[in-house]
Structures are given as C-alpha cells and as structure tokens.
Image: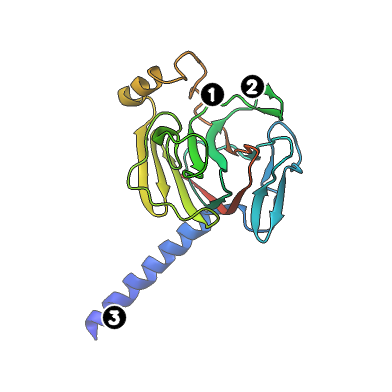
Amino acid sequence: MRKLLFLIPVFLCWNQLRAQDDHRWHYLFDGKGINELRGYQVDTFPDAWKVENGALVAQADVPNVDLVSKDTYTNFDLTLEWAMSKAGNSGIFYNVQESTVHQSGNGNSPNWLDNFEFQLLDDIDFNDHAPIRSAGSLYDLIIPVNKHLKPVGEFNTARLLVDHGHVEQWVNGEKVVEYELGSKEINELIAKSKYRNNPKFAKSTSGHIMFQHHGQKVWLRNIKIKRL
C-alpha cells in the first residue's frame, strides 16, 4: 500500500507535466482554421490552397503561391502530416524572410537559394531521383537515412526541430537528417553545393515557417508547433 501511495503523486506529477507540455503546442492548421497562415508576401490566404476534408491542399494548374506562418520563429518543434500526389513536390522552409522575390512563369515565389529546405516528394515518379534531393533530405545538402515512406497518396509524418543551432528532420518516427547550424560540417557542404555563390544563404536566424507550392497537389494536416 505504501508503494502504491508513493506512485500516485509521481503519476499525477507526470500527468501535470505532460498536460503543461501539450498546452505549449499551437496549431498552425487544425483541419479547419486558416487564421495562422497567409500567402507569401500577401496579407490574405491564397486561392492556390484549399481546405479539403481536414487538410490543406495545394492546387494544381494555378499560379504558385507558398504558405507562410503569420508569426515568426527562432527555436521550435514543428510536426505535421503530409501526403503527395503522383510526381508531386513540396517542402518545408524555416527562417524565411520575405524581402526577396523570384519572378517565374507561375507567379511570384521566394528565392529558393536563400533557405534550408526539408524536402517533401514522391520519390518514385518525380523526375529527379537524386537521393540528396529526395523526400526527407536537407535539400541538395544531406541525404536522409533510415527513411521509410508510405505509398503515394497516404499520409506520412514530418517533424522539424530547430533548437539553438541543432536541427533534426524526422519522417514517420525516424530521424533522417541531423546537423548543426554554423558548424564546420554544414559550412563545407554549403561550399560544395549550388548555394555556394549566394551570400544570403541560411544567414537568417529567425523567420517564418513556409510550405512550398510547387505546382502539384500536396496535402498537409495537423500542423502544430511549439516554441523552445
């Protein structure tokens, strides 16, 4: 009985800590509301994205407009579920600033050479099969490991952790990429990449979370974030 009485306060304390931690999570998209998001460089939610059956859906055959969080973040834990159409492409960016615009035939979009990207992709049917640009990669910099994707059309989970310079990318419960901002290792990778001639690359230390509209359908749901 004494042992049971000892365990009860411990259990209650653990539940209180878990409840406090859960309270820190904030939904950017809960299946309905879009008030936490807007289009890149615009004040409103773009027509290029629709809410369908509890998911945000990037529409095909429309001008590309990326989604950004209205708030900015520095250290955070971001989780979401994502599903890809056949040959689909998207990505998660962080520390995004809105000062640079690249003009393309599909409209205005950020300069992709400025920020790290957590790649979301149909690895099978997309026309680029390079592992360093595959789903879960730190796009064009680090190949993912221990990756297990669901079939196209089914939802995968993604987690992006940015914690005082330490970054982790997770896919379906497995850590697939890990790096340290500003480290010798990541700087050497940048110096060998297509980003090497861009002095702005990864220089921002805070900014918006951004979800890429690449012209193909992608489904995003249960997007939540916790500041660290």
Q: Amino acid at mark 1?
A: Asp
First-in-chain label (3 vs 1): 3
* Labelled pair 1, 2 in contact (Cβ < 8 Å): yes
Residue 219 visible (yes or no): yes
Quarter assignment of residue 100? top right
- Circle 3 residue: 5
| Residue 32 relative to residue 16: left or right | right
Residue 50 higher or lower than 207, as above or below: below
- Circle 2 residue: 100
- Marks counted in the figure total 3
In-front residue for pair 127/150: 127
- Circle 1 residue: 114
Residue 203 higher or lower than 55, as above or below: above
Q: Residue at x 52, y 28 (%)?
A: 115
Q: Residue at x 74, y 39 (%)?
A: 62
Whole-percent x and y of residue 109?
A: 66, 29
Select label 3 or label 1 by which is in front: 1
First-in-chain label (2 vs 3): 3
Whole-percent x and y of residue 225?
A: 53, 49
- Label 1: state its secondary structure: loop
Image quadrant holding the C terminus, namely top left
Q: Amino acid at mark 3?
A: Leu
Select label 2 or label 3 by which is in front: 2
Cα gap from disc 1 to disc 2, whole angstroms:
9 Å
Q: Amino acid at mark 2?
A: Thr
| Residue 24 relative to residue 53: left or right | left
In-front residue for pair 110/180: 110
Whole-percent x and y of residue 142?
A: 37, 33
- Label 3: state its secondary structure: helix
Cα gap from disc 3 to disc 1, whole angstroms:
57 Å
Q: Residue at x 75, y 37 (%)?
A: 43
Whole-percent x and y of residue 120?
A: 51, 42
